[in-house]
Amino acid sequence: MTKTIKFGIIGGGLMGREFASAAARWCHLLEADLRPELVAVCDTNPAIHTWYKENFPTVTLTTADYKELLADPGIEAVYCAVPHNLHAEIYTAVIRAGKHLMGEKPFGIDKAANDRIMRAIDENPDVLVRCSSEFPFYPAVQAIGRMIASRQFGRIIEVETGFLHSSDLDPNKPINWKRMIEFNGEYGCMGDLGIHACHIPCRAGWYPKNVRAILRKLVTERPDGKGGKVPCRTWDNATLFCEAADPAAPGDVFPLSIKTFRIAPGEKDTWTVKILGTEKSAFFSTKNPRRLEILEYAGGASQNWQQIDMGYDTAFKTITGGIFEFGFPDAILQMWASFLYEIEHGAPKELFAGCVTPGEAAASHRLFTAALESQRTGKTVSLELKTV
Ligand SMILES: NC(=O)c1ccc[n+]([C@@H]2O[C@H](COP(=O)([O-])OP(=O)(O)OC[C@H]3O[C@@H](n4cnc5c(N)ncnc54)[C@H](O)[C@@H]3O)[C@@H](O)[C@H]2O)c1
C-alpha cells in the first residue's frame, strides 16, 4: 500500500498547477512508494483557489496567508512557487516550520537572500530541501547523465549548456513581474533560466572556476498593460564563458559556456546540453525532445553523429509504453517522483535522477553574482565553487 504525504502549495499560479496536475496523475508511476496528497493551497489571488477547489476534493484549506498553511501540523511538505522577491521569507518560514520544501528557482532573489535560505537549511537538517529543475529528467538527458557517471566521454573538450526563449522578442509584450527588477531580481534572465542551465554541469562536478559574462538589455521599456510604458530593467540575455574541470582531472581545464536568453529568435523553450569529449560526444535539445545525438570516436577519419530515438525510458518507471514520446509534463512528474523518492530513501535513485540541491543552487548564485561583476568591470571574475 502506497504511503501518502500531505502537501501544501504556496503560490498556485503556473507552476503550482503543474505540480497539482502531476500529483493528480500519480497513478502513472509504477513503483512510487510515497504519494503526494494535496490538502492546502495558499495564494494571495483568491481567483486561483477556485481551480484547486474544483479539481482537488482533498484540498480542505485555501488561504491568502502562508502562515496559516504552515501552522497546520498535518502538512508535511510544501511546494513554493512564488515571485523571487518572496523566496527568502517564505522558504525560511517553511523550513523553520519543519516541513520538507521543494522551492522554485532561483532559490532567493539574490545571493543575500540565498544565504538566508542556506542558513535556515543548516539549522534544520531534518527537512529535505530541493530546488525544482525538470529538464534532466528527459530520457535522453538521463542517458547522457549515465554516460557522465560512467566516464564515457574521455577527456572533456568543451561543454555548452543553454536555455533559450523568444517570446520577449516582441517589444509590445506587456511587462509582468518576471521582467521587473523588484520582483525578478538583478539577475534577470539568469535568475529565471540559469539554474536549469547549470544543473548538469554542477551535478557532473564541472563547477566554473571563473566567468567572463556578456549580458544584454535589448528591450528597455515595455507596455504597462494600461496604455502607458514602463522601464524594463532586467537583463534579457546572458552568455557566461567559464573555465571548468572534471573532478577526476582537476588540472585539465576546459571551456564551459552557459547561455540564458529570453530573446533568442526561433527558440520557444529550448533547453540544450552539448558535451564534446575525446572518446564520446553528446547533444540534446528539447527542440527534438526524443532525439539523443551521440558521436563515438573509434579512431581514424570517420566521425559520425548518430541520432537515436529515445522512447519513454525514464528514471521512475511508468505505465507508458517504452516506444512513446516524453514531454514537459512528464519531466515535471519525474522530478516530483524524484523529490518524494529522496524524502523516503534519503538519497536520489541515481546521480542524475535527483533535483537540484541547495548547495548547487548556492553555487549558481555565486556564479550569477560574479557574472554581474564581470559585466560591470569587463573582466574575468574568479570563483571557487564546489558541491555543498
Ligand atoms: N521550473 C520551471 O520550469 C519554472 C517555470 C516557470 C516559473 N518557475 C518559477 O516558479 C516560481 C513561480 O513562477 P510562476 O511562473 O508559477 O508564476 P505565477 O505568477 O504564475 O505564479 C505565482 C503565484 O504566486 C502568487 N503569490 C504572489 N504573492 C504571494 C504570497 N505572498 N503568498 C502566496 N502566493 C503569492 C501569485 O498570486 C501567483 O498566483 C518562480 O520562482 C519562477 O522562477 C519555474
Image (cartoon, rainbow, N blue to C red):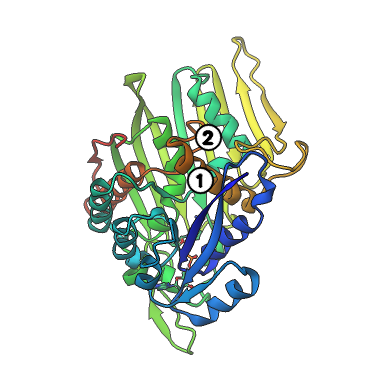
Do labels 2 and 1 touch, CB within 8 Å? no
Q: Is residue 230 above or below residue 275?
A: below
- Tell me how far mark 2 sits from mark 1, CA to CA: 29 Å
Q: Quadrant of residue 293?
A: top right
Kindly report which numbered mark, 2 or 1, lies closer to the viewer in this rendering: 1
Mark 2 secondary-structure assignment: strand
Q: Position of residue 352 (x, y in %)?
A: 50, 34
Q: Which mark is residue 340?
A: 1
Direction front: furthest residue: 1
Q: Which mark is residue 253?
A: none
Q: Is residue 334 visible?
A: yes
Q: Position of residue 125 (x, y in %)?
A: 29, 44
Mark 1 secondary-structure assignment: helix
Q: Name the residue located 45 percent from the left edge and 63 percent from the top edge.
A: 81
Q: Position of residue 230 (x, y in %)?
A: 39, 81
**Viewer-proximal residue, 159 or 59?**
59
Q: Quadrant of the N terminus?
A: top right
Count of marks placed on residues: 2
Quick check: 252 left or right of 55? left
Q: Name the residue located 59 percent from the left edge and 30 percent from the top edge.
A: 143
Q: Quadrant of the C terminus?
A: top left
Q: Position of residue 117 (x, y in %)?
A: 28, 54
Residue count near mark 2 (Cα–Cα under 10 Å), binned few <14, some 14–19, many ≥20: many
Quick check: 121 left or right of 222? left
Q: Name the residue located 58 percent from the left edge and 61 percent from the top edge.
A: 20
Residue count near mark 1 (Cα–Cα under 10 Å), binned few <14, some 14–19, many ≥20: many
Q: Which mark is residue 274?
A: 2
* Residue type, label 2: Lys
Quick check: 182 left or right of 22? left
